[in-house]
Image: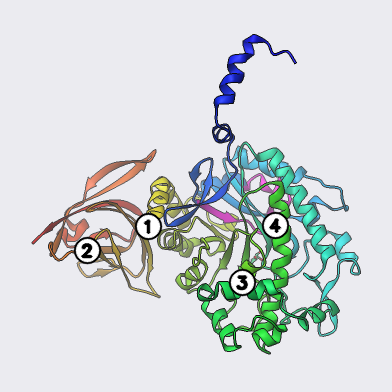
Amino acid sequence: MKIPASALPILLLSAAIPSAMLNAQQPAAPHLEKRGTATQLIVDGKPFLILGGELHNSSSSSLEYMKPIWPKLTTLGLNAVVTPLSWELIESKEGSYDFTLVDGLLGQARDAHQRIVFLWLASWKNGMSSYAPVWVKQNTRRFPRVVERSNEVEILSPMSAATQEADASAFAALMQHIKQVDSEQHTVLMMQMENEVGVLDDTRDHSAAANKAFASAVPPELTAYLKAHHDALYPELRALWDENGNKTAGTWEEVFGSTARADEIFMAWHYARFIQAVTARGKAAYNIPMYANTWLMGDDARPGDYPSGCPEPRVMDIWKAAGTAIDFYAPDLYAENFEQWSQRYHRDGNPLFMPETRGGAVGAANVFYALGQEAGFGFSPFGIEDETDGKSELTASYNLLASFAPLLAERQAAGAVHGFVLGKFRSSADFVMNGYTVHVTLDELFGDHASSGFGLIMATGPDEFIGAGKGFRVTFEPRSSSARQVGIAAVDEGVFVDGKWIPGRRLNGDENDQGKGWRFDSRQVTVEKVTLYRFE
Ligand code: DGJ
């Protein structure tokens, strides 16, 4: 082959460029990255905090229906929407894929400057199989159902290799298509695998295949995982395995006991094997973060009251033992004990993202806890299109958080953020930060007491903190014995414009209780900076 002389310098130059540099020029797909103490969603090289919302189940099945929703999402202050994409709508005829809806949603999202997290509603949605294509639903011999009390129910059995193959083939085709149309723009941030899977109304599948597997030995990969990770297992699972003698061989009941817990662990393993395999097929086509969500169990609930096998904290290790394709597990968190459930999911390397939660005033507060205290990378109230435009408290929180999101992500990575929600469940929060013990209480001034408050505090300099939120006040105690006292040098309100702090009023009067406390009044969310001084 003859190479024209004019091309030689270019060829020589490119030969000298290390391949890592050439790759660096291609935009990396959205991915999770451990930065400092936080696991963050990295999009186009930067941490992306999802200030999102999940649409009602059927909204994104129609491009026409979505038209007025997109501008509303932007007005609400969202930067991403979490929304279903169902198997039946892309493969209504076996082997024939139609991605018109996907392309339409991507186009609409781009026009509205929104990103998307798609929910792959395929074999299961809320335990049931209502989103599988009719050709799957009809063919119960090829795609067998879960059996409960001798009846087949409309839940595809996770024991079926044929169902797994059909789901995986469709998902791989979808991810291949998303790669083709989105690997430059990264409108699609992540994929949720199925939705709240598990057997409902019974503790496990009683089909012939399931009964046979249940009476057989627990797979050695599972017991090997339990042994290797014993000390880090979720305490409830560890206690169960300990009580049953830490057996590494035996049937499910021999290893986990003859209770509904063994049934739940058995189902968790089989759903996880299936979904890990489907996820791996999708990732082989286009590798972006993929996660599974959870219908959280109630305190005294029995498996089957909630989907048995869903990645509840107490069986999350079973899901991890079944494969590594799923990047993380997420709670659909409507429960009132928000802090506790958040902590149960933000543990042992699992980062916190909430695909479904409460919006309105409750969500407006909780987002500060999730992103502030638990280093969460995303928050997404369900039924977001119902949120009231313009005056929504959620919007006020989102707009404020968006104004300093890069700083927040950077402080999350440094482990220098705390968040809190004060009110019915707790009236104060204490933490250690930057050489100080920080006391946060509900705000009060001249006998007026706030009944609720929320916010977060970031350490931004040796004696400097930035806080955001409303209805709380903060005092500081130095931890070093050499400087016993601390005073407030100044409190400034301010705003972030293009990431730069622009100070506003100096607040050294009633607004900081004449130097007695750093206050955030209850009327609206604000951002303020405090500078401290120490003295003997
Ligand atoms: C949880 C499910 O995941 C959603 O799809 C939806 O059904 C909501 N519940 C309804 O509250």
Q: Is residue 66 magenta?
A: yes
Q: Quadrant of ligand 1?
A: bottom right
Distance from disc 4 to disc 1, alpha carbons, whole Å, reads 31 Å
The tag earlier along the polypeptide, 2 or 3, is 3
Q: How many neighbours does mark 4 have within 10 angstroms: few (below 14), some (14-19), or many (20 or more)?
A: many
Give the amino acid type for the residue marked by disc 3 in the picture.
Tyr
- Residue 279's mark? 4
Provide residue 64's location: percent of width, then percent of height: 72, 45
Mark before the other along the chain sequence, 2 or 1: 1
SS class, disc 2:
strand
User: Considering only order in the chain, which callout, 2 or 4, is on the residue closer to the N terminus?
Assistant: 4
Q: Which amino acid lies under the numbered mark 4 shown in the image of this protein?
A: Thr
At horizontal 50% and vertical 48% (from top left) the residue drawn is: 48
Q: CA distance from mark 2 to mark 1?
A: 18 Å
Nearest to N terminus: mark 3 or mark 4: 3
Who is closer to the viewer here, 123 or 467?
Answer: 123
Q: Looking at the picture, which amino acid does disc 2 mark?
A: Phe
Q: What segment is highlighted magenta in the picture?
A: 50-69
